[in-house]
Image (cartoon, rainbow, N blue to C red):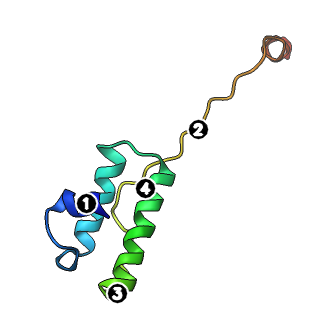
Amino acid sequence: MRRFILFHGSATRELGESQVGEFLTHLAVDRKVSASTENQALNALVFLYKGRARTPAWRRKGVVRAWPQRLPVVLHVREVKALLRQP
């Protein structure tokens, strides 16, 4: 929550859907956070807006998402040789 407020430099009651989208995009693109970190930030903001600010929940559209890192599939030398032997 602190990072969200510092990112925009104003009180949370004055911030709306577009500012939330900008912050989440900043996390994904500039800070390169993991998908789970971005989702945690999103859930904290949903809690804030639903519980304290009493603003209706907003949808997440047009926001760049962080993608979970996928490890490449690595084949063993025997598996590569077997694949190359096939007609």
Disc 4 target residue: 38
Percent of width and height locating residue 2: 28, 61
Kindly indicate the quadrant of the structure image that contains residue 52: bottom left
Q: Is residue 41 above or below residue 28?
A: below
Mark 1 residue crowding within 10 angstroms, few (<14) / some (14–19) / many (20+): some
Amino acid found under the numbered disc labelled 2: Arg
Amino acid found under the numbered disc labelled 4: Glu
Mark 2 and mark 1 lie on one chain; the one further toward the N terminus is: 1
Mark 3 and mark 4 lie on one chain; the one further toward the N terminus is: 4
Give the CA distance from mark 2 to mark 4. Answer: 17 Å
Element at badge 3? loop
Is residue 59 something one can see in this rendering?
no
Mark 2 vs mark 4, foreground winner is 4
Percent of width and height locating residue 38: 43, 55
**Circles 3 and 2 in contact, beta carbons < 8 Å:** no
Element at badge 1? helix
Disc 3 target residue: 56
Give the CA distance from mark 1 to mark 3. Answer: 18 Å
Amino acid found under the numbered disc labelled 3: Pro
Q: Looking at the image, which residue is at 20% across and 58% down?
A: 6
Q: Looking at the image, which residue is at 28% across and 57% down?
A: 3
Mark 4 and mark 1 lie on one chain; the one further toward the N terminus is: 1
Mark 2 and mark 4 lie on one chain; the one further toward the N terminus is: 4
Disc 2 target residue: 70
Percent of width and height locating residue 50: 39, 84
Give the CA distance from mark 3 to mark 4. Answer: 21 Å
Disc 1 target residue: 22
**Going by the image, does 63 lie left or right of 78?**
left
Give the CA distance from mark 3 to mark 2. Answer: 35 Å
**Residue 67, disc:** none
